[in-house]
C-alpha cells in the first residue's frame, strides 16, 4: 500500500509539472531578419515610360514586442534601363507590423504599414543633361508608403521561407527636385528619339503600384 501511495504521489507530481509546462506561454522570437528578391511595377497616369517593371532586392528587420505586435525597418533597391535612361530607386521604410498564426503552427501570416522615403534617380545613358542643369542624373527623395503582408513557412527552429509578400505602394514625386524633369517623354512626329521635358516644373506626381518579394527569414 505504501508503495502504491508513493507511486501515486510521484505520478501526480510529474503530471502537475507537465501540465504547468504545457500551460506556460511559449517564448517569443524577438527578431525576424528577412532577405530576398523583390519585383516592383510602377504606374504613373499618362506618363511615358510607365508602367515600369523594376527588379531588385529587399532586406528587413522586425522587432517583436509581443507574439503579435512588432516594428519593421526595411531597405529595398531596384533598377531598370528604360528608353535611353537608367531608372533606380532605394527605399528606406519603417512602421508597425503584426504577426498572426496558430501557436506552434508552421505557417505564420504577417501584415505591416510602412512609411519613409525613396532615393530616386534618373540618368541619361547618353550623358545628356536633365532639366536645366548640366548633370545627366536627376535625383529626388519622394515620401513613400507601403501597405501589405505575406506568409512565412517554417523549415526549422530559426529558418523560415517567405514565398509570398505583396504590397501596394505610393510615392509622391516632386518634379522641382528633378530639375523640372518629369520622365522621358514619348517621341513626337518630328523626333525619332525620346527626350526629357522640363515642362512639368512645379508639379507633384503620384507613382503607385504593386510589389512582390520572396526570400528567407531568420528568427531568434
Image (cartoon, rainbow, N blue to C red):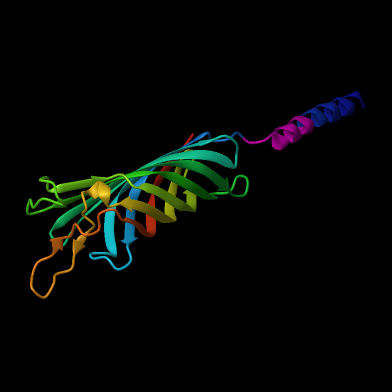
Reply above or below: 106 against 168.
Answer: above
- Picture coordinates of residue 72, whole percent (x, y): 47, 40
The quadrant in which the N terminus is found is top right
At 29% from the left edge and 65% from the top edge, which residue is drawn?
51
- Picture coordinates of residue 43, whole percent (x, y): 33, 63
The residue lying toward the viewer, choosing from 153 and 87, is 87
Tell me, yes or no, whether the highlighted magenta stretch contains residue 185. no
Residue 91 found in image quarter? top left
- Picture coordinates of residue 150, whole percent (x, y): 48, 53
The magenta span reads 15-26
Residue 59 found in image quarter? top left
- Picture coordinates of residue 29, whole percent (x, y): 54, 35
Q: Is 94 left, or right, of 187 in this rendering? A: right
The residue lying toward the viewer, choosing from 129 and 214, is 129
Please name the predominant secondary structure of the magenta segment in the image: helix
At 54% from the left edge and 49% from the top edge, which residue is drawn?
106
The residue lying toward the viewer, choosing from 173 and 26, is 173
Q: Is 161 left, or right, of 186 in this rendering? A: right
Reply above or below: 128 against 7.
Answer: below
At 36% from the left edge and 52% from the top edge, which residue is drawn?
172
Amino acid at each position: 500500500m505504501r508503495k502504491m501511495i508513493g507511486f501515486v504521489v510521484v505520478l501526480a507530481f510529474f503530471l502537475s509539472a507537465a501540465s504547468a509546462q504545457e500551460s506556460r506561454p511559449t517564448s517569443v522570437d524577438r527578431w525576424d531578419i528577412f532577405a530576398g528578391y523583390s519585383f516592383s511595377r510602377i504606374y504613373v497616369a499618362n506618363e511615358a515610360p510607365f508602367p515600369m517593371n523594376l527588379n531588385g532586392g529587399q532586406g528587413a528587420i522586425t522587432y517583436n514586442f509581443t507574439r503579435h505586435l512588432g516594428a519593421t525597418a526595411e531597405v529595398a533597391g531596384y533598377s531598370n534601363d528604360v528608353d535611353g535612361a537608367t531608372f533606380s530607386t532605394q527605399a528606406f521604410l519603417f512602421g508597425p507590423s503584426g504577426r498572426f498564426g496558430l501557436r506552434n503552427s508552421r505557417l505564420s501570416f504577417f501584415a505591416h504599414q510602412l512609411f519613409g522615403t525613396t532615393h530616386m534617380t534618373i540618368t541619361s545613358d547618353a550623358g545628356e543633361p536633365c532639366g536645366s542643369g548640366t548633370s545627366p542624373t536627376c535625383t529626388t527623395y519622394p515620401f513613400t508608403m507601403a501597405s501589405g503582408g505575406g506568409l512565412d513557412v517554417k523549415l526549422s527552429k530559426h529558418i523560415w521561407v517567405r514565398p509570398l509578400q505583396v504590397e501596394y505602394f505610393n510615392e509622391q514625386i516632386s518634379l522641382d527636385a528633378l530639375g523640372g524633369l518629369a520622365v522621358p517623354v514619348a517621341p513626337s512626329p518630328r523626333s525619332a528619339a525620346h527626350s526629357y521635358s522640363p515642362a512639368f516644373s512645379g508639379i507633384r506626381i503620384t507613382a503607385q503600384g504593386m510589389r512582390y518579394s520572396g526570400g528567407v527569414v531568420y528568427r531568434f
